[in-house]
Image: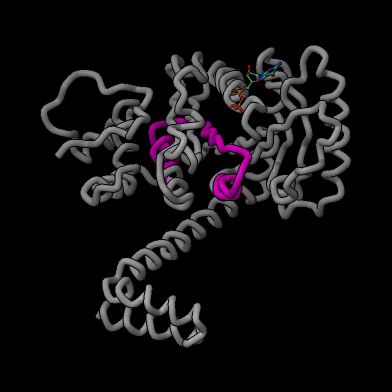
Amino acid sequence: MSIPKNTGQESISKVKGKRKSPPSVAELVEGILSSNKTALARAITLVESSNGEHLKKATEILEHCLGKKSDTVRIGITGVPGVGKSTFIETFGKTLTSKGKKVAVLAVDPTSSLSKGSILGDKTRMEELVKDPNAFIRPSPSGDSLGGVARKTRETIILCEAAGYDVILIETVGVGQSETAVHGMVDFFLLLKLAGAGDELQGMKRGIMEMADAIVINKADGDNIKPAQLAKTEFSRALHLYPPKENGWVPKVLTCSASENTGIQEIWEVIDRYMERAKQSDHFLLNRQGQNKNWLLQHIDSQIKSDFYSNPKVASLLPKIIQEVTQSKVSPFAAAEKLIQAYRQEAK
Ligand code: GDP
């Protein structure tokens, strides 16, 4: 049995040396717990696999890795393409490793399997961070559903933390539902924006503003410094119109230049302050516990759904029933009941 390569998205840390057989669960767990990047990358490949045997192994590895390190910070980073996410992560990540932190960079990009890795897939991104021994970068897992991609990323967070990474940065593109998924797996959610268009608040999805713990206006350099300051004022004003967050945190608005490395340290200070407060008030723990509960319920949801639709009886009845419902021959509720009955009988 060989462990498949992560299609088109090889791990940064290549497996060195040739082995005859794949490493055992115990070997991988030991490797992860001793911060071995190769073992970590291999275990992530198992998590990302769709092969049942690999998933079984992945589950065992995860069991051994759960709760190994809890003093971590999970930070979600979003923003439209071109806003400077990878430049920011490179500069921010290097700032953190220079403080002695170990940084893992992951991504949630459900489109990457179609576009062959639109984020983090490009090896020229984060050139410096890739070489940093205290950084681990993993492109987005591929998958045909956001739910599947999100599940793999959540499990990868657990593996990275067990391998000793203190800060987990999770990048996502500022389009679609992936932001909500990432928000549901992090402690702090950072939104990158650009200034200068004069219509900063227009076209801004309300939900994303509400999710943000900080809004950072990037590219505040050169002629853009003044517009960035104006945008900062405008965003701060707009944020005050939102109801306060449950944990009492008032989202911060900052400016930075990822390429010139200005304002980056201040962003870390804000996150650090947030974490300190969240831990003091138990919000940190409650948030993570709530996220665990949601993952459990979401997973049950998706498993039951996939079990239902892959049931042979359901699969054979469904096309005909859909036709009957669309032609108003049967009510949708009666049709659903009929399918569920068929499923239950088959499942017995
Ligand atoms: P992403 O698509 O959000 O990951 O954005 P990138 O990090 O690839 O950056 C898009 C472009 O913006 C690149 O040409 C970067 O060099 C540039 N860029 C990123 N950050 C800054 C910044 O702080 N200032 C300036 N002037 N350009 C930047």
Q: Is residue 341 visible?
A: yes
Expressed as whole percent of the image width and height from the top left, the position of residue 58 reads: 29, 45
Q: Is residue 138 left or right of residue 256?
A: left
The residue sitting at the left extreme is: 20
Expressed as whole percent of the image width and height from the top left, the position of residue 25 reads: 22, 41
> What residue sits 86% from the left and 46% below the top?
240
Residues rendered magenta in the picture: 155-182
Q: Nearer the viewer, residue 233 or 331?
A: 331
Expressed as whole percent of the image width and height from the top left, the position of residue 177 reads: 58, 49
> What residue sits 33% from the left and 75% below the top?
314
Q: Is residue 208 above or below residue 106?
A: below
> What residue sits 34% from the left and 46% below the top?
62
Q: Is residue 332 above or below residue 253?
A: below
Q: Quadrant of ligand 1?
A: top right
Q: Is residue 210 left or right of residue 72?
A: right
What quarter of the picture does the N terminus occupy? top left
Residue 38 location, quadrant: top left
